[in-house]
Amino acid sequence: MQILKFANAAEMHRINLLFLVILMQNLRSTQQNQDKTQGNHAIKRTDGGVSYANFEIHKFHYLQVSPPAFSHEVLQAQECAFACVTQQTCYSFNIGLSPNQNGKFLCELLSGDKFRSPTNLTSSQQFDHYSIESPCSSHPCKNNGTCIPNYEENTYSCSCTPGHRGRYCGKVCSAPLGMEDYIITPTQISASSQYDSNHAPNQGRLHFKKTGSRVGSWSALGNNVHQWFQVDLRIETTVTFLATQGRNMHGQWVTKYKLQYGNDGSTFRVFKQDGESSDKVFVGNSDRDTVVKNPVISPVKARYIRLIPTEWHNHISMRIELYGCLENMQALGMESGSIADSQIIASSMFNVYHKPARARLHTKELGLSTGTGGWSSLTNDLNQWLQVDLGKITNVTYIATQGRNHYSPSQWVKKYKIQFSDEGVSFLFYKRQGDSSDTVFEGNFDQDTVVYHLLDPPITARFLRVKPTQWQNHISMRMELYTFPGET
Protein backbone atom coordinates (compact mmCIF):
# COMPACT_ATOMS: atom_id res chain seq x y z
CA MET A 1 0.00 0.00 0.00
CA GLN A 2 1.27 3.49 -0.89
CA ILE A 3 0.31 6.32 1.47
CA LEU A 4 0.25 9.99 0.50
CA LYS A 5 0.27 12.61 3.25
CA PHE A 6 -0.50 16.33 3.15
CA ALA A 7 0.17 18.82 5.93
CA ASN A 8 -0.30 22.58 6.23
CA ALA A 9 1.88 25.07 8.06
CA ALA A 10 -1.12 27.41 8.17
CA GLU A 11 -4.85 26.88 8.25
CA MET A 12 -5.87 25.44 4.89
CA HIS A 13 -8.76 27.00 3.01
CA ARG A 14 -11.79 24.72 2.71
CA ILE A 15 -9.91 21.47 3.36
CA ASN A 16 -8.69 19.62 6.39
CA LEU A 17 -5.39 17.77 6.63
CA LEU A 18 -5.94 14.48 4.84
CA PHE A 19 -4.35 11.09 4.66
CA LEU A 20 -5.08 9.64 1.25
CA VAL A 21 -4.59 5.90 1.16
CA ILE A 22 -3.89 4.44 -2.26
CA LEU A 23 -3.71 0.80 -3.15
CA MET A 24 -0.63 -0.04 -5.20
CA GLN A 25 -2.43 -1.29 -8.30
CA ASN A 26 -5.42 1.07 -8.41
CA LEU A 27 -7.41 3.58 -6.39
CA ARG A 28 -9.76 1.29 -4.46
CA SER A 29 -10.49 3.48 -1.49
CA THR A 30 -9.85 6.93 -0.06
CA GLN A 31 -9.68 7.49 3.67
CA GLN A 32 -9.83 10.83 5.50
CA ASN A 33 -8.39 11.51 8.96
CA GLN A 34 -7.82 14.88 10.61
CA ASP A 35 -4.21 14.83 11.85
CA LYS A 36 -0.87 16.63 11.59
CA THR A 37 2.10 15.09 9.82
CA GLN A 38 5.14 14.92 12.08
CA GLY A 39 8.79 14.95 10.94
CA ASN A 40 10.27 15.41 7.48
CA HIS A 41 8.50 18.70 6.99
CA ALA A 42 8.92 20.47 3.65
CA ILE A 43 9.73 17.31 1.72
CA LYS A 44 8.19 16.21 -1.55
CA ARG A 45 9.30 12.74 -2.51
CA THR A 46 8.51 9.05 -2.62
CA ASP A 47 10.55 7.25 0.01
CA GLY A 48 10.04 3.60 0.91
CA GLY A 49 6.60 3.57 -0.68
CA VAL A 50 5.47 6.79 1.03
CA SER A 51 4.89 9.97 -0.98
CA TYR A 52 4.20 13.15 0.94
CA ALA A 53 4.43 16.94 0.94
CA ASN A 54 3.62 19.71 3.40
CA PHE A 55 1.84 22.67 1.85
CA GLU A 56 1.35 26.18 3.15
CA ILE A 57 -1.36 28.49 1.88
CA HIS A 58 -1.08 32.01 0.50
CA LYS A 59 -4.68 33.18 0.55
CA PHE A 60 -5.82 35.44 -2.25
CA HIS A 61 -2.54 35.09 -4.12
CA TYR A 62 -1.64 33.80 -7.57
CA LEU A 63 1.77 32.64 -8.84
CA GLN A 64 2.30 33.34 -12.53
CA VAL A 65 4.28 30.50 -14.13
CA SER A 66 3.93 30.23 -17.88
CA PRO A 67 2.81 27.82 -19.02
CA PRO A 68 1.43 25.76 -16.09
CA ALA A 69 2.73 22.19 -15.99
CA PHE A 70 -0.88 20.98 -16.01
CA SER A 71 -4.30 22.63 -15.74
CA HIS A 72 -7.61 20.90 -15.03
CA GLU A 73 -10.79 21.13 -12.97
CA VAL A 74 -11.36 19.53 -9.57
CA LEU A 75 -14.24 19.21 -7.13
CA GLN A 76 -12.16 20.10 -4.08
CA ALA A 77 -8.73 21.48 -3.24
CA GLN A 78 -7.28 18.23 -1.92
CA GLU A 79 -7.57 16.75 -5.42
CA CYS A 80 -5.29 19.51 -6.69
CA ALA A 81 -2.81 18.90 -3.84
CA PHE A 82 -2.88 15.16 -4.53
CA ALA A 83 -2.19 15.75 -8.22
CA CYS A 84 0.76 18.03 -7.39
CA VAL A 85 2.41 15.47 -5.13
CA THR A 86 1.99 12.66 -7.63
CA GLN A 87 3.35 14.72 -10.55
CA GLN A 88 7.14 14.80 -10.39
CA THR A 89 7.55 18.30 -11.88
CA CYS A 90 4.96 20.05 -9.66
CA TYR A 91 6.22 22.17 -6.77
CA SER A 92 3.23 24.45 -6.14
CA PHE A 93 -0.31 25.03 -7.37
CA ASN A 94 -3.00 27.67 -7.80
CA ILE A 95 -6.62 26.81 -6.94
CA GLY A 96 -9.57 28.89 -8.11
CA LEU A 97 -11.97 30.24 -5.49
CA SER A 98 -15.12 30.33 -7.62
CA PRO A 99 -16.64 27.11 -9.01
CA ASN A 100 -17.83 26.89 -12.58
CA GLN A 101 -21.35 25.86 -13.57
CA ASN A 102 -20.43 22.23 -12.89
CA GLY A 103 -19.30 23.02 -9.37
CA LYS A 104 -15.62 22.49 -10.19
CA PHE A 105 -12.60 24.66 -9.39
CA LEU A 106 -9.68 25.47 -11.68
CA CYS A 107 -6.46 23.70 -10.57
CA GLU A 108 -3.11 24.82 -12.02
CA LEU A 109 -0.08 22.64 -11.27
CA LEU A 110 3.16 24.67 -11.44
CA SER A 111 6.74 23.63 -12.14
CA GLY A 112 8.00 26.78 -10.42
CA ASP A 113 7.65 28.22 -6.93
CA LYS A 114 7.59 31.52 -5.06
CA PHE A 115 11.30 31.24 -4.20
CA ARG A 116 12.54 31.09 -7.79
CA SER A 117 10.01 33.70 -8.96
CA PRO A 118 9.22 35.92 -5.95
CA THR A 119 8.00 38.84 -8.06
CA ASN A 120 5.48 36.59 -9.83
CA LEU A 121 3.46 35.98 -6.65
CA THR A 122 0.74 38.65 -6.76
CA SER A 123 -2.51 39.43 -4.97
CA SER A 124 -5.65 37.92 -6.48
CA GLN A 125 -9.31 37.75 -5.46
CA GLN A 126 -9.84 34.71 -7.70
CA PHE A 127 -7.14 32.31 -6.45
CA ASP A 128 -5.31 30.86 -3.48
CA HIS A 129 -1.73 29.71 -3.95
CA TYR A 130 -0.21 26.66 -2.23
CA SER A 131 3.55 26.14 -1.94
CA ILE A 132 5.55 23.34 -0.36
CA GLU A 133 7.20 24.27 2.92
CA SER A 134 10.94 24.77 2.47
CA PRO A 135 14.04 25.85 4.40
CA CYS A 136 13.92 28.84 2.04
CA SER A 137 11.02 30.15 4.14
CA SER A 138 13.58 31.32 6.71
CA HIS A 139 15.33 33.47 4.05
CA PRO A 140 18.83 32.01 4.61
CA CYS A 141 20.46 33.69 1.58
CA LYS A 142 22.11 37.00 2.39
CA ASN A 143 22.61 40.12 0.28
CA ASN A 144 19.46 39.59 -1.82
CA GLY A 145 20.54 36.11 -2.91
CA THR A 146 17.83 33.83 -4.33
CA CYS A 147 17.06 30.66 -2.37
CA ILE A 148 16.65 27.60 -4.63
CA PRO A 149 14.89 24.79 -2.74
CA ASN A 150 15.61 21.11 -3.20
CA TYR A 151 12.32 19.66 -2.01
CA GLU A 152 13.35 16.04 -2.39
CA GLU A 153 16.24 16.42 0.06
CA ASN A 154 14.77 19.20 2.22
CA THR A 155 17.80 21.39 1.46
CA TYR A 156 18.51 24.49 -0.61
CA SER A 157 21.21 26.43 -2.43
CA CYS A 158 21.73 30.18 -2.80
CA SER A 159 22.02 31.93 -6.16
CA CYS A 160 24.01 35.05 -5.30
CA THR A 161 23.66 38.55 -6.67
CA PRO A 162 26.65 40.01 -8.52
CA GLY A 163 29.43 40.82 -6.11
CA HIS A 164 28.66 38.09 -3.57
CA ARG A 165 29.31 34.39 -3.19
CA GLY A 166 29.54 31.58 -0.65
CA ARG A 167 26.98 29.12 0.64
CA TYR A 168 24.81 31.91 2.04
CA CYS A 169 26.02 34.68 -0.32
CA GLY A 170 27.74 36.19 2.71
CA LYS A 171 31.16 36.64 1.12
CA VAL A 172 31.70 39.95 -0.65
CA CYS A 173 33.10 39.28 -4.11
CA SER A 174 33.42 42.71 -5.67
CA ALA A 175 36.92 43.84 -4.73
CA PRO A 176 39.14 45.48 -7.37
CA LEU A 177 41.61 42.87 -8.56
CA GLY A 178 44.57 45.18 -9.07
CA MET A 179 44.62 47.12 -12.34
CA GLU A 180 44.39 50.56 -10.79
CA ASP A 181 46.63 49.90 -7.77
CA TYR A 182 49.30 47.96 -9.75
CA ILE A 183 48.85 44.70 -7.83
CA ILE A 184 48.49 43.39 -11.37
CA THR A 185 51.97 43.88 -12.80
CA PRO A 186 52.79 45.15 -16.32
CA THR A 187 53.86 41.64 -17.35
CA GLN A 188 50.30 40.41 -16.69
CA ILE A 189 48.74 42.87 -19.15
CA SER A 190 48.87 42.35 -22.91
CA ALA A 191 46.99 43.30 -26.05
CA SER A 192 46.57 42.32 -29.67
CA SER A 193 48.50 45.44 -30.71
CA GLN A 194 49.51 48.92 -29.59
CA TYR A 195 49.62 52.15 -31.54
CA ASP A 196 53.22 52.62 -30.35
CA SER A 197 55.17 52.30 -27.09
CA ASN A 198 53.42 55.38 -25.67
CA HIS A 199 50.03 53.63 -26.04
CA ALA A 200 51.08 50.41 -24.26
CA PRO A 201 48.75 47.90 -22.56
CA ASN A 202 50.18 48.88 -19.16
CA GLN A 203 48.42 52.23 -19.61
CA GLY A 204 45.05 50.49 -19.83
CA ARG A 205 44.55 50.82 -16.06
CA LEU A 206 41.47 52.49 -14.61
CA HIS A 207 42.11 56.20 -13.90
CA PHE A 208 45.52 56.14 -15.62
CA LYS A 209 46.36 59.76 -16.55
CA LYS A 210 48.33 61.13 -19.48
CA THR A 211 51.93 61.52 -18.30
CA GLY A 212 54.41 63.25 -20.59
CA SER A 213 54.57 61.34 -23.86
CA ARG A 214 52.59 58.42 -22.42
CA VAL A 215 48.95 58.81 -23.39
CA GLY A 216 46.06 58.22 -21.02
CA SER A 217 45.08 54.69 -22.07
CA TRP A 218 45.96 51.67 -24.14
CA SER A 219 45.29 52.28 -27.82
CA ALA A 220 45.24 49.61 -30.51
CA LEU A 221 47.29 49.91 -33.68
CA GLY A 222 44.25 49.39 -35.90
CA ASN A 223 40.50 49.74 -35.57
CA ASN A 224 38.86 46.37 -36.20
CA VAL A 225 36.98 43.65 -34.31
CA HIS A 226 40.15 41.54 -34.02
CA GLN A 227 41.68 43.74 -31.32
CA TRP A 228 41.71 42.63 -27.68
CA PHE A 229 42.97 43.68 -24.26
CA GLN A 230 44.01 40.88 -21.86
CA VAL A 231 44.75 40.48 -18.16
CA ASP A 232 46.46 37.40 -16.73
CA LEU A 233 45.25 37.00 -13.13
CA ARG A 234 47.81 34.19 -12.61
CA ILE A 235 45.29 31.97 -10.83
CA GLU A 236 41.69 31.03 -11.51
CA THR A 237 39.75 33.99 -10.12
CA THR A 238 36.04 34.72 -9.84
CA VAL A 239 35.27 37.91 -11.80
CA THR A 240 31.95 39.61 -11.02
CA PHE A 241 32.21 43.12 -12.53
CA LEU A 242 34.01 44.92 -15.37
CA ALA A 243 34.72 48.67 -15.35
CA THR A 244 35.92 50.70 -18.35
CA GLN A 245 36.95 54.24 -19.27
CA GLY A 246 38.00 55.92 -22.49
CA ARG A 247 41.29 57.69 -23.20
CA ASN A 248 42.17 60.47 -20.78
CA MET A 249 42.41 63.94 -22.41
CA HIS A 250 41.51 62.59 -25.84
CA GLY A 251 38.21 61.85 -27.58
CA GLN A 252 38.57 58.09 -27.96
CA TRP A 253 36.64 55.29 -26.24
CA VAL A 254 35.08 51.87 -26.72
CA THR A 255 31.26 51.98 -26.88
CA LYS A 256 30.60 48.21 -26.93
CA TYR A 257 32.65 45.11 -26.17
CA LYS A 258 32.50 41.38 -25.54
CA LEU A 259 34.19 39.31 -22.84
CA GLN A 260 36.34 36.23 -23.38
CA TYR A 261 37.88 34.06 -20.68
CA GLY A 262 40.11 30.99 -20.39
CA ASN A 263 42.69 29.19 -18.29
CA ASP A 264 45.56 28.33 -20.64
CA GLY A 265 46.08 31.62 -22.50
CA SER A 266 45.26 30.13 -25.90
CA THR A 267 41.73 28.72 -25.70
CA PHE A 268 38.99 31.23 -24.88
CA ARG A 269 35.23 31.11 -24.46
CA VAL A 270 32.97 34.04 -25.27
CA PHE A 271 30.83 35.04 -22.30
CA LYS A 272 27.08 34.51 -22.53
CA GLN A 273 24.79 35.92 -19.88
CA ASP A 274 22.74 33.46 -17.83
CA GLY A 275 20.04 31.86 -19.96
CA GLU A 276 21.15 33.51 -23.21
CA SER A 277 22.31 31.68 -26.33
CA SER A 278 24.07 34.63 -27.98
CA ASP A 279 27.29 36.37 -26.92
CA LYS A 280 26.81 39.09 -24.33
CA VAL A 281 27.60 42.57 -25.68
CA PHE A 282 28.46 44.97 -22.86
CA VAL A 283 27.67 48.67 -23.11
CA GLY A 284 30.90 50.63 -22.84
CA ASN A 285 31.66 54.32 -22.61
CA SER A 286 30.17 57.51 -23.99
CA ASP A 287 32.98 59.89 -23.01
CA ARG A 288 36.65 59.91 -21.99
CA ASP A 289 36.66 59.57 -18.20
CA THR A 290 33.30 58.39 -16.85
CA VAL A 291 33.61 54.90 -15.35
CA VAL A 292 31.02 52.43 -16.67
CA LYS A 293 30.68 49.33 -14.48
CA ASN A 294 28.93 46.18 -15.74
CA PRO A 295 27.99 43.07 -13.74
CA VAL A 296 29.05 39.67 -15.05
CA ILE A 297 25.98 37.42 -14.64
CA SER A 298 26.79 34.66 -13.80
CA PRO A 299 30.36 35.40 -12.69
CA VAL A 300 33.21 33.74 -14.60
CA LYS A 301 36.05 31.85 -12.98
CA ALA A 302 39.18 32.02 -15.09
CA ARG A 303 42.83 32.99 -15.15
CA TYR A 304 42.79 35.03 -18.38
CA ILE A 305 40.26 37.79 -19.08
CA ARG A 306 39.97 39.43 -22.51
CA LEU A 307 37.89 42.40 -23.57
CA ILE A 308 37.03 42.47 -27.29
CA PRO A 309 35.96 45.92 -28.59
CA THR A 310 33.11 45.65 -31.11
CA GLU A 311 32.24 49.36 -31.51
CA TRP A 312 34.24 52.50 -30.71
CA HIS A 313 34.37 56.27 -30.97
CA ASN A 314 37.22 57.59 -33.18
CA HIS A 315 39.74 54.93 -32.08
CA ILE A 316 39.98 51.78 -29.92
CA SER A 317 41.31 53.14 -26.62
CA MET A 318 40.41 51.99 -23.13
CA ARG A 319 41.24 51.72 -19.45
CA ILE A 320 39.81 48.95 -17.28
CA GLU A 321 39.46 47.41 -13.84
CA LEU A 322 38.29 43.90 -12.95
CA TYR A 323 36.37 43.12 -9.77
CA GLY A 324 35.89 39.82 -8.01
CA CYS A 325 36.97 37.63 -5.13
CA LEU A 326 40.27 38.26 -3.41
CA GLU A 327 40.89 34.96 -1.71
CA ASN A 328 43.30 36.45 0.85
CA MET A 329 45.75 33.72 -0.06
CA GLN A 330 48.40 33.16 2.57
CA ALA A 331 51.73 31.65 1.57
CA LEU A 332 52.73 28.86 3.93
CA GLY A 333 56.41 29.76 4.04
CA MET A 334 58.53 28.35 1.21
CA GLU A 335 59.51 31.75 -0.17
CA SER A 336 59.62 33.58 3.18
CA GLY A 337 61.71 30.93 4.92
CA SER A 338 59.22 30.24 7.71
CA ILE A 339 59.29 26.67 6.43
CA ALA A 340 62.77 25.63 7.57
CA ASP A 341 65.33 23.92 5.33
CA SER A 342 64.96 20.79 7.46
CA GLN A 343 61.26 20.60 6.53
CA ILE A 344 62.08 20.31 2.81
CA ILE A 345 63.42 16.97 1.56
CA ALA A 346 63.59 15.14 -1.75
CA SER A 347 64.11 11.72 -3.26
CA SER A 348 67.56 12.86 -4.45
CA MET A 349 69.62 15.91 -5.35
CA PHE A 350 72.15 16.51 -8.11
CA ASN A 351 74.65 17.74 -5.48
CA VAL A 352 74.61 19.89 -2.35
CA TYR A 353 74.23 23.07 -4.40
CA HIS A 354 70.99 21.70 -5.89
CA LYS A 355 69.57 20.71 -2.50
CA PRO A 356 65.80 20.67 -1.73
CA ALA A 357 66.02 23.96 0.20
CA ARG A 358 66.79 25.66 -3.16
CA ALA A 359 63.19 24.82 -4.18
CA ARG A 360 61.75 28.00 -2.64
CA LEU A 361 59.66 30.16 -4.98
CA HIS A 362 61.71 32.97 -6.60
CA THR A 363 65.06 31.52 -5.46
CA LYS A 364 67.81 33.03 -7.65
CA GLU A 365 70.80 31.31 -9.26
CA LEU A 366 73.92 32.16 -7.23
CA GLY A 367 76.36 29.96 -9.10
CA LEU A 368 77.15 26.26 -9.42
CA SER A 369 79.50 26.39 -6.43
CA THR A 370 77.24 28.55 -4.24
CA GLY A 371 73.59 27.73 -4.87
CA THR A 372 71.49 27.02 -7.94
CA GLY A 373 68.16 28.56 -8.88
CA GLY A 374 66.08 25.57 -7.87
CA TRP A 375 66.12 22.01 -6.60
CA SER A 376 67.43 19.51 -9.16
CA SER A 377 67.15 15.73 -8.80
CA LEU A 378 70.10 13.39 -9.26
CA THR A 379 68.35 11.42 -12.00
CA ASN A 380 65.43 11.96 -14.33
CA ASP A 381 62.80 9.30 -13.72
CA LEU A 382 59.28 8.89 -12.33
CA ASN A 383 60.58 7.99 -8.86
CA GLN A 384 61.68 11.53 -8.00
CA TRP A 385 59.78 13.73 -5.55
CA LEU A 386 60.03 16.95 -3.55
CA GLN A 387 58.41 16.96 -0.09
CA VAL A 388 57.38 19.70 2.36
CA ASP A 389 56.60 19.04 6.03
CA LEU A 390 54.14 21.74 7.12
CA GLY A 391 54.66 20.92 10.80
CA LYS A 392 50.98 20.23 11.46
CA ILE A 393 47.89 19.21 9.53
CA THR A 394 47.14 22.19 7.29
CA ASN A 395 44.52 23.17 4.72
CA VAL A 396 46.36 23.67 1.38
CA THR A 397 44.31 25.39 -1.31
CA TYR A 398 46.82 26.48 -3.99
CA ILE A 399 50.18 25.36 -5.29
CA ALA A 400 52.61 27.47 -7.33
CA THR A 401 55.65 26.25 -9.28
CA GLN A 402 58.59 27.66 -11.27
CA GLY A 403 61.44 26.15 -13.22
CA ARG A 404 65.15 26.61 -12.51
CA ASN A 405 66.27 30.21 -12.58
CA HIS A 406 68.94 31.41 -15.03
CA TYR A 407 70.51 28.26 -16.39
CA SER A 408 71.25 26.89 -19.84
CA PRO A 409 70.00 24.53 -21.07
CA SER A 410 66.72 25.57 -19.47
CA GLN A 411 65.11 23.20 -16.96
CA TRP A 412 61.59 22.90 -15.56
CA VAL A 413 58.87 20.40 -14.70
CA LYS A 414 56.12 20.24 -17.33
CA LYS A 415 53.68 17.99 -15.48
CA TYR A 416 53.38 16.58 -11.99
CA LYS A 417 51.17 14.76 -9.52
CA ILE A 418 50.66 15.51 -5.82
CA GLN A 419 50.74 13.11 -2.88
CA PHE A 420 49.83 13.89 0.72
CA SER A 421 50.03 12.25 4.14
CA ASP A 422 49.26 12.94 7.79
CA GLU A 423 52.18 10.96 9.26
CA GLY A 424 54.77 11.03 6.43
CA VAL A 425 54.78 7.28 5.80
CA SER A 426 51.66 6.35 3.84
CA PHE A 427 50.85 8.75 0.99
CA LEU A 428 47.71 9.17 -1.12
CA PHE A 429 47.58 10.63 -4.63
CA TYR A 430 45.48 13.77 -5.03
CA LYS A 431 42.32 13.53 -7.15
CA ARG A 432 40.08 16.41 -8.13
CA GLN A 433 36.50 16.24 -6.92
CA GLY A 434 34.51 13.70 -8.94
CA ASP A 435 37.58 12.16 -10.62
CA SER A 436 38.59 8.54 -10.18
CA SER A 437 42.12 8.95 -11.58
CA ASP A 438 45.10 10.83 -10.14
CA THR A 439 45.17 14.51 -11.10
CA VAL A 440 48.04 15.48 -13.42
CA PHE A 441 48.84 19.18 -13.06
CA GLU A 442 50.17 21.30 -15.90
CA GLY A 443 53.51 22.63 -14.72
CA ASN A 444 55.81 25.21 -16.24
CA PHE A 445 56.65 26.25 -19.78
CA ASP A 446 59.68 28.42 -19.02
CA GLN A 447 62.15 29.06 -16.23
CA ASP A 448 60.58 31.85 -14.18
CA THR A 449 56.85 32.25 -14.85
CA VAL A 450 54.85 31.23 -11.78
CA VAL A 451 52.07 28.75 -12.57
CA TYR A 452 49.32 28.47 -9.97
CA HIS A 453 46.76 25.73 -9.46
CA LEU A 454 43.68 25.73 -7.28
CA LEU A 455 43.25 22.56 -5.23
CA ASP A 456 39.54 21.77 -5.29
CA PRO A 457 38.93 20.11 -2.93
CA PRO A 458 41.77 21.43 -0.75
CA ILE A 459 44.38 19.07 0.66
CA THR A 460 44.23 18.70 4.43
CA ALA A 461 47.49 17.07 5.52
CA ARG A 462 50.87 17.66 7.16
CA PHE A 463 53.13 16.30 4.39
CA LEU A 464 52.83 17.20 0.71
CA ARG A 465 54.88 15.70 -2.14
CA VAL A 466 55.24 16.83 -5.73
CA LYS A 467 56.04 13.99 -8.15
CA PRO A 468 57.25 15.16 -11.59
CA THR A 469 55.91 13.15 -14.54
CA GLN A 470 57.30 15.23 -17.45
CA TRP A 471 60.18 17.72 -17.60
CA GLN A 472 62.27 19.94 -19.85
CA ASN A 473 65.93 18.76 -20.00
CA HIS A 474 66.13 17.98 -16.26
CA ILE A 475 63.87 17.73 -13.19
CA SER A 476 64.32 21.14 -11.55
CA MET A 477 61.74 23.23 -9.77
CA ARG A 478 60.77 25.86 -7.21
CA MET A 479 57.44 26.01 -5.40
CA GLU A 480 55.12 27.62 -2.83
CA LEU A 481 52.00 26.37 -1.03
CA TYR A 482 49.04 28.54 0.02
CA THR A 483 45.98 28.51 2.23
CA PHE A 484 43.07 30.91 2.68
CA PRO A 485 40.10 31.29 5.07
CA GLY A 486 36.89 29.45 4.27
CA GLU A 487 33.77 30.97 2.75
CA THR A 488 30.63 32.16 4.52
Image (cartoon, rainbow, N blue to C red):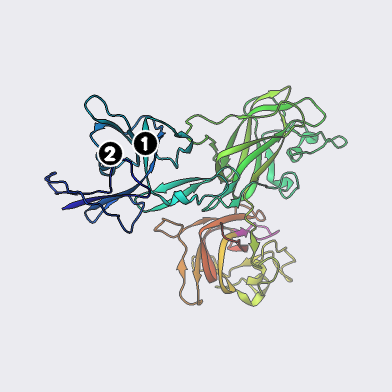
Q: Quadrant of residue 487?
A: bottom right
Say which residue label 2 marks: 77
The part of the chain drawn in magenta is 400-412
Name which residue type carries label 2: Ala
In the image, is 453 to the left or to the right of 373? left
Q: Is residue 209 above or below residue 150?
A: above
Residue 72 lies, with reference to residue 466, above or below; the image says above
Identify whether 415 is placed above or below 464. above
Of residues 207 and 466, the one drawn nearer to the viewer in this rendering: 207
Q: Is residue 406 magenta?
A: yes
SS state under label 1: strand
Residue 128 disc label? 1
Q: Which disc, if any, is residue 40?
A: none
Q: Are marks 1 and 2 in contact (CB under 8 Å)?
A: yes
Question: Image point 52% across, 64% down: which residue?
Answer: 459
Where, quadrant-wise, is the C terminus in this rendering?
A: bottom right
Check the image and report above or below for 402 versus 384.
above
